[in-house]
Image: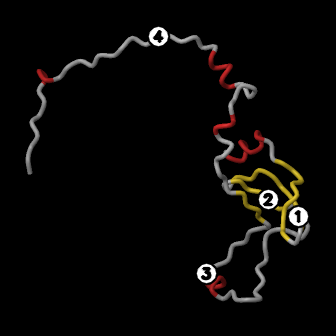
Amino acid sequence: MSKEPIETVDDVKAAVFQEVEKQDESYKSSTTSTDDLNLDVILDVPVTLSMEIGRTQINIRNLLQLNQGSVVELDRFAGEPLDVLVNGTLVAHGEVVVINEKFGIRLTDVISVSERVKRLA
């Protein structure tokens, strides 16, 4: 095990910093304005969109007993809107539709930004 020499007070030098110029704070209002934001930089970022029809909790014993034909009761009533989640965050509610033999979702209610922020707390 090699020991590094311990610096003595004589080896310590003061840090030198350049003078920082005070900037005009008017830039803050222009960059935070929604009109001036350039969203092009994030438009191609992939996100995961998922629909949730309901949830339930079961113990592992019952989970292991599930097989083809088993029915699992969910916490939603028939006809209730589905939750639309983006990366796990609720952004809307909707209903199932069928288009050209494929499932889709029609958005019936989009959650406002302020409401999404409230749900985070």
Q: Amino acid at mark 2?
A: Asp
Which numbered disc covers residue 65? none
Residue 82 x, y percent position in the rendering: 83, 62
As helix, strand or loop, the secondary structure at mark 3 comes to helix
Q: Which of pointers 2 and 3 lies earlier in the amino acid sequence?
A: 3
Left/right placement of residue 10 relative to residue 87 reads left
Q: Is residue 69 above or below residue 27?
A: below
Q: Which residue is at a point 84% across and 63% down the rendered structure image?
A: 104
Most extreme residue toward the right is 79
For label 1, count other residues whose C-alpha is less than 10 Å away and answer few (under 14), some (14-19) or many (20+).
few
* Label 4 – label 3 distance at C-alpha: 63 Å
Q: Which residue is at a point 76% across and 40% down the rendered structure image?
A: 113
Q: Which of pointers 4 and 3 lies earlier in the amino acid sequence?
A: 4
Residue 42 x, y percent position in the rendering: 65, 41
Identify the residue position indicated by label 2 in the image.
Answer: 83
Q: Which of pointers 2 and 4 lies earlier in the amino acid sequence?
A: 4
For label 4, count other residues whose C-alpha is less than 10 Å away and answer few (under 14), some (14-19) or many (20+).
few
Q: Is residue 46 above or below residue 105?
A: above
- Is label 2 or label 3 in front? 2
